[in-house]
Image (spheres, coloured by chain):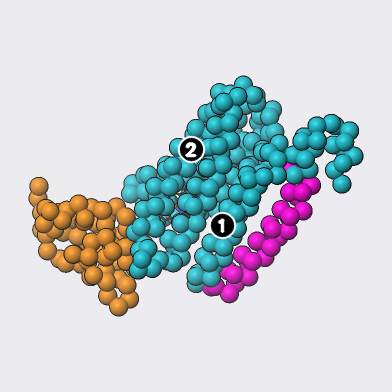
Chain colours: A cyan, B orange
Amino acid sequence: MALWYLTRATGGVALVLLTITLVLGIVDVARLSSQRTPRFVVDAVHRTASLFVVLLVAIHVLTAVLDSFAPIRLADAIVPFGGTYRPVWVGLGALSFDLLLALAVTSLLRARIGVRAWRTVHWAAYACWPFAFMHALGTGSDIKPGWMLWLSLACAAAVALAVLARAAASYSAGVAVTGVTAVLAIAGLALALWIPAGPLANGWAKKSGTPSSLLGGKR
Amino acid sequence: MRPERLVVDPTACTAHGMCAELFPEWIQLDDWGYPMIDSGDVPPDLRDHAERAVKMCPALALKLRRGS
Ligand code: HEM
Ligand code: SF4
């Protein structure tokens, strides 16, 4: 059981660090630096934080596999959607993990593979985060509405702001901001509808303890 | 160790100016943010700074070259 707690703790911290990494990456390309936080600082923290993300997620995955609480195999952490324990939501985590590994490996080999190839892979960062986010909300559906939910939502807000700022700083800012705003609005609306009906409803039902009141009590 | 000079690939450089932040002793930015680099050999005691600037360049446009 101790391992399972470690799984959750590292998962939460990894999401926060991944958010920081993503936001700093965006700040970096959007050149939102200043005299007091010069670019090389943003860049260095971005690179260092990303390595901690890989480390934390590795612990997160290993403890989840080693712990006997949930039947998760090592393969389920890498090959998405093949498992028996919440396959969709663990699968999203596996997808995110795969992208994370690709980002880290290509970044470490950047000088060798060249900027163009590295850059192409690096766009995957924008998919990596949403996968991790949905994995956190979906897999943690027995997590009661509490700090993990608010933490995840705070991360989402930070990412949304950064992506908007990135769009505003891009060459065709008008089109980019409109597009990003539309995507963010749809995502926000979908989340607002899904969270109360999905993870929150289940969490509440678990807490109430009885399957009958689970169905009756949930709106 | 043979002397080395810092050179920039002007087509790859994206004018981020990171190199000038990291190695101001050797690199200055022009009005458009592109680096102007001292063409002399990098002295051994500044070598670490030169290497860091090369490693951190987002465009991998900065290189250390053996002197001619
Ligand atoms: C593994 C997690 C990582 C994530 C989620 C991530 C995310 C990002 C994002 C979102 C951007 C902005 C890309 C854009 O909008 O064009 C970025 C830029 C950047 N990342 Fe990462 N990154 C990660 C790892 C790394 C690593 C390990 C390095 C080490 C070399 C690195 C180096 C860079 C650099 C240099 C930029 C700026 C590129 C530029 O200014 O043109 N990243 N990153
Ligand atoms: S850090 Fe690289 S891309 Fe930026 S100005 Fe210097 S050489 Fe050009």
Q: Residue at x 13, y 58 (%)?
A: B42
Q: How many marks?
A: 2
Q: Is A202 above or below relative to A115?
A: above
Q: Secondary structure at mark 1?
A: helix
Tell me: A60 left or right of A139. Answer: left
Separation of disc 2 and disc 1 at Cα? 20 Å
| Rendered location of residue A62, percent (x, y) | 52, 28
Q: Residue at x 60, y 58 (%)?
A: A157
Is A7 or A168 nearer to us in this picture? A7
Residue A195 is inside the magenta segment: yes
Whether marks 2 and 1 lie on the same chain: yes
Q: Residue A216: which quarter of the image?
A: top right
Where is mark 2, residue-wise?
Answer: A56
Where is mark 1, residue-wise?
Answer: A159
Q: Earlier in the sequence, mark 2 or mark 1?
A: 2
Q: Residue furthest bottom?
A: B31
Task: Work out whether residue A143 can be spotted.
Answer: yes
| Rendered location of residue A7, percent (x, y) | 56, 32
